[in-house]
Image: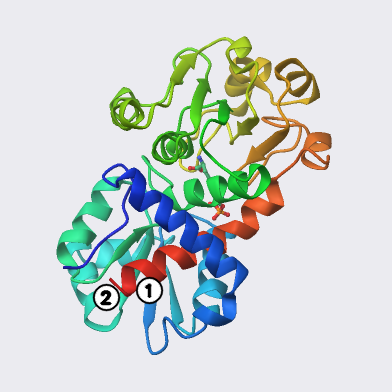
Protein backbone atom coordinates (compact mmCIF):
# COMPACT_ATOMS: atom_id res chain seq x y z
CA UNK A 1 0.00 0.00 0.00
CA UNK A 2 1.30 3.46 -0.86
CA UNK A 3 2.38 5.70 2.01
CA UNK A 4 1.88 9.49 2.03
CA UNK A 5 3.52 12.16 4.14
CA UNK A 6 0.88 14.74 4.98
CA UNK A 7 2.00 15.06 8.61
CA UNK A 8 4.23 13.09 10.98
CA UNK A 9 1.46 13.08 13.61
CA UNK A 10 0.59 9.43 12.86
CA UNK A 11 4.23 8.23 12.92
CA UNK A 12 5.84 6.29 15.77
CA UNK A 13 8.93 7.67 17.56
CA UNK A 14 10.89 4.71 16.17
CA UNK A 15 9.86 5.42 12.56
CA UNK A 16 10.77 9.09 13.04
CA UNK A 17 14.20 8.19 14.44
CA UNK A 18 14.80 5.84 11.51
CA UNK A 19 13.92 8.56 9.01
CA UNK A 20 16.27 11.01 10.75
CA UNK A 21 19.06 8.42 10.59
CA UNK A 22 18.35 7.81 6.91
CA UNK A 23 18.70 11.56 6.27
CA UNK A 24 22.05 11.55 8.11
CA UNK A 25 23.21 8.58 6.03
CA UNK A 26 22.12 10.10 2.70
CA UNK A 27 23.90 13.33 3.56
CA UNK A 28 27.08 11.48 4.51
CA UNK A 29 27.15 8.98 1.63
CA UNK A 30 25.24 10.51 -1.31
CA UNK A 31 26.91 8.20 -3.85
CA UNK A 32 25.19 5.19 -2.27
CA UNK A 33 21.81 6.77 -2.99
CA UNK A 34 22.42 8.21 -6.45
CA UNK A 35 20.16 5.66 -8.16
CA UNK A 36 17.32 5.16 -5.71
CA UNK A 37 14.93 7.19 -7.88
CA UNK A 38 16.31 6.03 -11.24
CA UNK A 39 13.53 6.04 -13.84
CA UNK A 40 11.11 7.76 -11.45
CA UNK A 41 9.31 11.03 -12.13
CA UNK A 42 7.90 13.26 -9.41
CA UNK A 43 5.45 16.11 -9.95
CA UNK A 44 5.86 19.11 -7.65
CA UNK A 45 2.80 21.33 -7.63
CA UNK A 46 2.86 24.74 -5.94
CA UNK A 47 -0.18 26.89 -5.13
CA UNK A 48 2.09 29.30 -3.20
CA UNK A 49 5.55 30.78 -3.83
CA UNK A 50 8.72 28.97 -2.80
CA UNK A 51 12.48 29.23 -3.05
CA UNK A 52 13.89 26.60 -0.72
CA UNK A 53 11.27 23.88 -1.10
CA UNK A 54 11.06 24.07 -4.87
CA UNK A 55 14.80 24.13 -5.49
CA UNK A 56 15.75 21.62 -2.81
CA UNK A 57 13.22 19.09 -4.13
CA UNK A 58 14.32 19.62 -7.72
CA UNK A 59 18.06 19.33 -7.07
CA UNK A 60 17.56 16.63 -4.44
CA UNK A 61 15.51 14.43 -6.79
CA UNK A 62 18.19 14.89 -9.42
CA UNK A 63 20.85 13.72 -6.96
CA UNK A 64 18.80 10.55 -6.34
CA UNK A 65 18.67 9.83 -10.08
CA UNK A 66 15.05 10.89 -10.56
CA UNK A 67 13.29 13.61 -12.54
CA UNK A 68 11.04 16.41 -11.26
CA UNK A 69 8.27 18.20 -13.15
CA UNK A 70 7.41 21.59 -11.65
CA UNK A 71 3.77 22.53 -11.95
CA UNK A 72 2.99 26.15 -11.26
CA UNK A 73 -0.63 26.64 -10.28
CA UNK A 74 -0.02 29.95 -8.50
CA UNK A 75 -1.99 31.64 -11.26
CA UNK A 76 -4.97 29.54 -10.18
CA UNK A 77 -5.55 28.51 -13.78
CA UNK A 78 -5.16 24.81 -13.28
CA UNK A 79 -7.10 24.84 -10.02
CA UNK A 80 -9.97 26.50 -11.88
CA UNK A 81 -9.96 24.07 -14.85
CA UNK A 82 -10.82 20.89 -13.03
CA UNK A 83 -11.43 19.50 -9.56
CA UNK A 84 -8.46 18.63 -7.34
CA UNK A 85 -9.60 15.01 -7.28
CA UNK A 86 -9.27 14.79 -11.08
CA UNK A 87 -5.96 16.68 -11.16
CA UNK A 88 -4.48 14.19 -8.68
CA UNK A 89 -5.84 11.09 -10.46
CA UNK A 90 -4.40 12.33 -13.77
CA UNK A 91 -0.99 13.13 -12.27
CA UNK A 92 -0.86 9.64 -10.78
CA UNK A 93 -1.19 8.19 -14.31
CA UNK A 94 2.35 9.39 -15.08
CA UNK A 95 4.09 10.36 -11.87
CA UNK A 96 5.62 8.09 -9.23
CA UNK A 97 4.91 10.63 -6.48
CA UNK A 98 3.28 14.03 -6.00
CA UNK A 99 4.83 16.79 -3.90
CA UNK A 100 2.33 19.58 -3.22
CA UNK A 101 2.34 23.01 -1.54
CA UNK A 102 -1.28 24.00 -1.06
CA UNK A 103 -3.45 26.49 0.79
CA UNK A 104 -5.66 23.93 2.48
CA UNK A 105 -4.77 20.64 4.13
CA UNK A 106 -8.02 19.23 2.74
CA UNK A 107 -6.57 19.51 -0.79
CA UNK A 108 -3.77 17.16 0.29
CA UNK A 109 -6.32 14.74 1.73
CA UNK A 110 -8.17 14.82 -1.59
CA UNK A 111 -4.88 14.19 -3.45
CA UNK A 112 -4.07 11.34 -1.09
CA UNK A 113 -7.38 9.58 -1.81
CA UNK A 114 -7.40 10.25 -5.55
CA UNK A 115 -3.76 9.39 -6.35
CA UNK A 116 -2.44 5.85 -6.00
CA UNK A 117 1.11 7.20 -5.57
CA UNK A 118 2.73 8.81 -2.50
CA UNK A 119 1.73 12.42 -1.77
CA UNK A 120 4.19 14.64 0.14
CA UNK A 121 3.12 17.81 1.94
CA UNK A 122 5.43 20.65 0.87
CA UNK A 123 3.54 23.07 3.23
CA UNK A 124 -0.12 23.68 3.84
CA UNK A 125 -2.12 25.78 6.28
CA UNK A 126 -1.60 23.25 9.10
CA UNK A 127 1.80 21.63 8.65
CA UNK A 128 5.26 21.87 7.12
CA UNK A 129 6.67 18.39 7.83
CA UNK A 130 9.68 18.62 5.48
CA UNK A 131 10.78 21.71 7.38
CA UNK A 132 10.39 19.96 10.73
CA UNK A 133 12.60 17.06 9.64
CA UNK A 134 15.33 19.37 8.29
CA UNK A 135 15.31 21.38 11.51
CA UNK A 136 15.75 18.40 13.83
CA UNK A 137 18.41 17.01 11.49
CA UNK A 138 20.19 20.34 12.01
CA UNK A 139 19.84 20.10 15.80
CA UNK A 140 21.02 16.48 15.73
CA UNK A 141 24.15 17.55 13.84
CA UNK A 142 24.86 20.40 16.27
CA UNK A 143 24.18 18.60 19.55
CA UNK A 144 24.74 14.95 18.57
CA UNK A 145 21.21 14.15 19.80
CA UNK A 146 17.67 15.47 19.88
CA UNK A 147 16.54 13.82 23.14
CA UNK A 148 16.51 16.04 26.19
CA UNK A 149 17.08 19.29 24.28
CA UNK A 150 14.64 22.20 24.45
CA UNK A 151 13.47 24.21 21.49
CA UNK A 152 11.64 27.49 22.11
CA UNK A 153 9.55 28.76 19.22
CA UNK A 154 8.79 32.50 19.47
CA UNK A 155 6.22 34.27 17.30
CA UNK A 156 3.07 33.33 15.40
CA UNK A 157 1.63 29.87 16.08
CA UNK A 158 1.51 28.46 12.54
CA UNK A 159 2.19 25.52 10.22
CA UNK A 160 5.90 25.50 11.06
CA UNK A 161 5.18 25.62 14.81
CA UNK A 162 2.87 22.64 14.43
CA UNK A 163 5.39 20.47 12.61
CA UNK A 164 8.15 21.42 15.05
CA UNK A 165 5.88 20.37 17.93
CA UNK A 166 5.05 17.00 16.36
CA UNK A 167 8.52 16.07 15.11
CA UNK A 168 10.11 17.37 18.34
CA UNK A 169 7.74 15.29 20.47
CA UNK A 170 8.55 12.19 18.40
CA UNK A 171 12.30 12.80 18.71
CA UNK A 172 12.30 13.52 22.45
CA UNK A 173 12.90 17.27 22.24
CA UNK A 174 11.11 19.48 24.82
CA UNK A 175 9.08 22.33 23.39
CA UNK A 176 8.26 25.85 24.48
CA UNK A 177 5.91 27.91 22.30
CA UNK A 178 5.76 31.64 23.06
CA UNK A 179 3.14 33.60 21.14
CA UNK A 180 1.26 36.86 21.59
CA UNK A 181 -2.29 36.38 22.84
CA UNK A 182 -4.62 35.39 20.02
CA UNK A 183 -1.83 33.85 17.93
CA UNK A 184 -1.45 30.53 19.74
CA UNK A 185 -0.78 27.24 17.96
CA UNK A 186 -3.88 25.22 17.03
CA UNK A 187 -5.24 23.52 20.20
CA UNK A 188 -6.07 20.44 18.12
CA UNK A 189 -2.48 20.07 16.92
CA UNK A 190 -0.99 20.89 20.33
CA UNK A 191 -3.16 18.04 21.66
CA UNK A 192 -1.72 15.71 18.95
CA UNK A 193 1.81 16.68 20.00
CA UNK A 194 1.00 16.27 23.71
CA UNK A 195 -0.35 12.77 23.08
CA UNK A 196 3.00 11.85 21.51
CA UNK A 197 4.93 13.72 24.21
CA UNK A 198 3.28 11.63 26.92
CA UNK A 199 4.83 8.53 25.36
CA UNK A 200 8.27 10.04 24.78
CA UNK A 201 8.50 11.92 28.11
CA UNK A 202 8.73 15.34 26.47
CA UNK A 203 7.33 18.53 28.02
CA UNK A 204 5.32 21.03 25.97
CA UNK A 205 4.83 24.50 27.46
CA UNK A 206 2.75 27.28 25.90
CA UNK A 207 3.07 30.86 27.10
CA UNK A 208 2.67 34.51 26.16
CA UNK A 209 5.76 35.34 28.28
CA UNK A 210 9.22 35.40 26.73
CA UNK A 211 10.69 34.25 30.05
CA UNK A 212 9.18 30.80 29.32
CA UNK A 213 12.02 30.40 26.79
CA UNK A 214 14.73 30.76 29.46
CA UNK A 215 17.08 27.79 29.44
CA UNK A 216 16.16 26.70 25.90
CA UNK A 217 18.97 25.31 23.72
CA UNK A 218 17.59 26.85 20.56
CA UNK A 219 15.30 29.79 19.79
CA UNK A 220 13.23 29.46 16.61
CA UNK A 221 11.57 32.30 14.65
CA UNK A 222 9.24 32.35 11.64
CA UNK A 223 7.50 35.10 9.73
CA UNK A 224 4.72 36.95 11.58
CA UNK A 225 2.62 36.85 8.39
CA UNK A 226 2.33 33.49 6.69
CA UNK A 227 1.62 33.28 2.96
CA UNK A 228 -1.97 34.20 2.28
CA UNK A 229 -2.34 36.34 5.45
CA UNK A 230 -3.00 39.92 4.34
CA UNK A 231 -3.18 41.55 7.78
CA UNK A 232 -1.56 45.00 7.45
CA UNK A 233 2.07 44.98 8.61
CA UNK A 234 1.48 47.93 10.98
CA UNK A 235 -1.13 45.98 12.93
CA UNK A 236 1.12 42.93 13.13
CA UNK A 237 4.18 44.94 14.14
CA UNK A 238 2.42 46.51 17.08
CA UNK A 239 1.51 43.12 18.46
CA UNK A 240 4.65 41.16 17.54
CA UNK A 241 7.54 43.62 17.95
CA UNK A 242 7.98 42.70 21.66
CA UNK A 243 8.43 39.10 20.45
CA UNK A 244 11.27 39.89 18.07
CA UNK A 245 14.06 37.31 18.23
CA UNK A 246 17.15 39.40 18.86
CA UNK A 247 20.46 39.45 20.71
CA UNK A 248 18.82 40.52 23.98
CA UNK A 249 16.51 37.48 23.87
CA UNK A 250 19.42 35.16 23.10
CA UNK A 251 21.29 36.61 26.08
CA UNK A 252 18.29 36.42 28.42
CA UNK A 253 17.44 32.82 27.52
CA UNK A 254 21.04 31.58 27.29
CA UNK A 255 20.21 29.75 24.04
CA UNK A 256 23.17 28.48 22.01
CA UNK A 257 21.60 28.83 18.57
CA UNK A 258 18.91 30.62 16.61
CA UNK A 259 16.86 28.97 13.86
CA UNK A 260 14.41 30.23 11.23
CA UNK A 261 12.78 28.30 8.38
CA UNK A 262 13.10 31.33 6.04
CA UNK A 263 12.09 33.44 4.19
CA UNK A 264 13.27 35.74 7.00
CA UNK A 265 12.36 39.40 7.35
CA UNK A 266 15.42 41.15 8.72
CA UNK A 267 14.74 43.36 11.75
CA UNK A 268 11.13 42.25 11.98
CA UNK A 269 10.76 38.75 13.48
CA UNK A 270 14.57 38.36 13.73
CA UNK A 271 17.40 40.87 13.66
CA UNK A 272 19.62 40.84 10.59
CA UNK A 273 22.69 40.84 12.82
CA UNK A 274 21.52 37.63 14.51
CA UNK A 275 20.95 35.96 11.13
CA UNK A 276 24.55 36.84 10.26
CA UNK A 277 25.98 35.82 13.65
CA UNK A 278 27.74 32.59 14.59
CA UNK A 279 24.63 31.56 16.54
CA UNK A 280 22.67 31.28 13.30
CA UNK A 281 21.76 27.85 11.91
CA UNK A 282 19.68 29.22 9.04
CA UNK A 283 21.82 28.06 6.13
CA UNK A 284 22.42 24.65 7.68
CA UNK A 285 18.63 24.28 8.00
CA UNK A 286 18.21 25.33 4.36
CA UNK A 287 20.83 22.82 3.21
CA UNK A 288 19.21 20.09 5.28
CA UNK A 289 15.88 20.60 3.55
CA UNK A 290 17.30 18.66 0.64
CA UNK A 291 18.79 15.82 2.70
CA UNK A 292 15.62 15.41 4.76
CA UNK A 293 13.40 15.39 1.68
CA UNK A 294 15.68 12.89 -0.02
CA UNK A 295 15.24 10.59 2.96
CA UNK A 296 11.45 11.02 2.73
CA UNK A 297 11.39 10.22 -1.00
CA UNK A 298 13.82 7.30 -0.64
CA UNK A 299 11.59 5.81 2.04
CA UNK A 300 8.20 6.44 0.43
CA UNK A 301 9.20 5.35 -3.07
CA UNK A 302 10.99 2.22 -1.96
CA UNK A 303 8.38 1.07 0.57
N1 LIG B 1 11.23 27.29 4.36
C1 LIG B 1 10.57 27.21 3.18
O1 LIG B 1 9.68 26.38 3.00
O2 LIG B 1 10.98 28.10 2.25
P1 LIG B 1 10.25 28.36 0.84
O3 LIG B 1 8.90 28.98 1.17
O4 LIG B 1 11.14 29.30 0.12
O5 LIG B 1 10.08 27.06 0.14
N1 LIG C 1 4.73 30.02 8.08
C1 LIG C 1 5.29 30.37 6.81
C2 LIG C 1 6.36 29.40 6.44
C3 LIG C 1 7.07 29.70 5.15
C4 LIG C 1 8.09 28.64 4.81
C5 LIG C 1 4.19 30.42 5.75
O1 LIG C 1 3.31 29.55 5.77
O2 LIG C 1 4.23 31.34 4.92
Q: Which residue is mark 2?
A: 91
Q: Which mark is residue 114?
A: none
Residue at 64 percent of width and 31 percent of height: 218
Left or right position of 178 against 218: left
| Rendered location of residue 129, percent (x, y) | 42, 49
Q: Residues within 10 Å of mark 1 (few under 14, many from 20)?
A: many
The numbered mark, 2 or 1, whose residue comes first in the sequence reads 1
| Rendered location of residue 303, percent (x, y) | 28, 71
- Residue 20, compared with residue 155, is above or below; it is below
Q: CA distance from mark 2 to mark 1?
A: 7 Å
Left or right position of 180 against 247: left
CB-based contact (under 8 Å), mark 2 and mark 1: yes
Q: Residue furthest bottom?
A: 39
Left or right position of 273 against 66: right
- Classify residue 40 by image quadrant: bottom left
| Rendered location of residue 20, percent (x, y) | 47, 54
Please tell me whether mark 1 sits on a helix, a strand or a loop: strand
For the N terminus, the image quarter is bottom left
Amino acid sequence: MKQDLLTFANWTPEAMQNLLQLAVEIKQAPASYSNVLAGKSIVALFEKPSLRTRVSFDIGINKLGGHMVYLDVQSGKLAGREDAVDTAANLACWADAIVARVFSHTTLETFSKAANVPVVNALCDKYHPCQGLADYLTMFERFGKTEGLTMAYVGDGNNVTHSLLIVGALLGCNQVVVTPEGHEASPEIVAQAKAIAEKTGVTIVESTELSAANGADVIYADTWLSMGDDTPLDVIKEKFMPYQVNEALMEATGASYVMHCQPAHRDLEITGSLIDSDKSLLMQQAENRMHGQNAILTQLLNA
